[in-house]
Image (tube, rainbow, N blue to C red):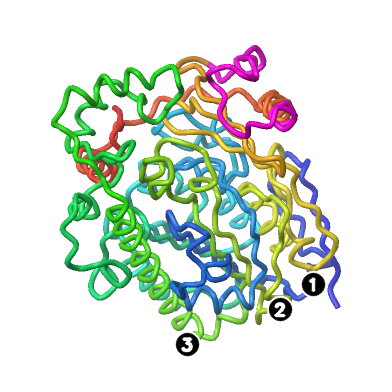
Amino acid sequence: MYCLALILTGCSGLSPVGPSPVWPAGIPPGAPILVVSMDTLRPDRLGAYGNPDGLTPNLDAFAREAVVFDRAYSQAVQTAPSHASMFTSRYPTEQTSPDNQTVLVREHPTLASVLGVYGYQTAGFVAGGDLSPHRKLTQGFATYETSEDFGSLYHTFPRALAWLDTVNPAQPWFLFLHGYDCHSIYLKPTPYGYLHADLGWTGAAAMAVQTATERIIDGHIYPNLDGLLRADNGLLRARSPQNRARVQELLGQGEAPVAVSGEDVTYIRGVYNGAVSYSDAMFGKLLAGLEQRGVLDKAVIVVMSDHGEQLGERGIFGHCCGLGDEETQSVLMVRLPGGARGGRHIASFVELVDLLPTLAEIAGARAPAGIRGRSLVGALEDLEFEGREYAHSQGNVRMRIVSVRGHEGRLTYAGMPATGRYLADVVEVARLDGPGFEGTADLVARASLRAELVAWLRTLEAGPDVTASPIPAALKQSLRDHGYFEVTP
């Protein structure tokens, strides 16, 4: 029987020191590693997370042979900053410019670069969009390919399987695979598009599922929302009480909004569920390809989502405007080789920044200094595992929103400065009952969560001053077409 490997997280370099003499239980030395990112997939759509509707038979079967983390949270609710945090095990503002121009800075080692130093063959196959090479998330990947912009696992998994056919069997490999199947635009090919929704629906939302559903605000569809809000960068995404009046003023200048009924909301959710089932089907095809190649039961396979999605819970759709559980709670499942120790659920809070130290330990690698994550190998080994007491997230454009999730509930602060360094004292001086705070109404819980939020912010390193390179025109338009209204420069 193997024993728990020890990891030195305080080292400053990445020089390999040879194989670890001990390994996490059930994981052979040099086990290949596959990470599958299912963009915008809400955990509550999976049977493994309690959904009774049978939307995801392949993922549910996978979960029965995996360790399922029931309370995993993303550190950002857009694709680029969330994956950047996962790759580097750092919080969003520590690694890049605090806006939608997420670009990695090279002095932060990534998961791929760490594993590459330890002899892993590395490759990433992504569906463009916010994971396009422009974001510089390619660091450490010997192969990094984009396919159909805002595409599906359907576009990426065949290329990934083809790459597996070329790897050197004498060396371990790390493969990252990504698809936008559950991202808007939700409507997917027949039969999945209307598998869980009324094909003949003619309500106000019938067109919204074929465009960006982010145009729905407070129960109304605003046809030219992107044009209105582009004039005030970041206004919608930082929905603090201070700027709600300005939002409404801008919205009043455009075309008359169209009311969305409860039936419309049900319809949109049904179309989203169809996208979930489509994603599950593509995942099933990936597993079949892995099994055919004899690697399914040899690899450590991680399935995760970079963030969730609001589906009308607060009158909004998409992942643009808040840090509630709907947007920040993520799928996270880890299947050990052969499905060892599978079927267990971990109730503790964990963060996506925990993936780098976890996979580094599994690989027998030393994690870089300065990371924020904590290894989850103890949970995989069925040892005593406490996890985190709190999970933290940062908002979108200019990172004006911060949030903490604990057992007491959630507390979110909106109104961080839009320019300059990211300063914790802005939250420190805010009144607990002030207009910037939203969350649990219990004053004792609010006080506890506020203290944790302030303490966490004080630990963050000042972010780098990064000037993003211009986004190519075609990519900029594609981002806007998929709900990213504030795309600069």
Q: Amino acid at mark 3?
A: Gln
Q: Secondary structure at mark 1?
A: loop
* Front-lying residue, 6 or 30: 6
Which quadrant is the N terminus positioned in? bottom right
Give the residues drawn in magenta, as a range.
421-449
Give the side of residue 229 with respect to residue 234, left or right.
left
Q: CA distance from mark 1 to mark 3?
A: 26 Å
Between discs 3 and 2, the one toward the N terminus: 3
- The spot of residue 312 in percent (x, y) is 38, 47
In the image, residue 283 lies in the stretch drawn in magenta: no
Give the side of residue 363 with respect to residue 258, left or right.
right
Q: Residue at x 26, y 19 (%)?
A: 249
Between discs 2 and 1, the one toward the N terminus: 1
Task: Residue 340: give its label.
Answer: 2
Q: From the image, tell me which residue sits under label 3.
A: 292
Q: From the image, tell me which residue sits under label 1.
A: 25
Give the side of residue 208 with respect to residue 58, left or right.
left
Between discs 1 and 3, the one toward the N terminus: 1
- Write down the quadrant of residue 445 in the picture: top right
Q: Residue at x 62, y 47 (%)?
A: 353
Q: CA distance from mark 3 to mark 2?
A: 20 Å
Q: Secondary structure at mark 2?
A: loop
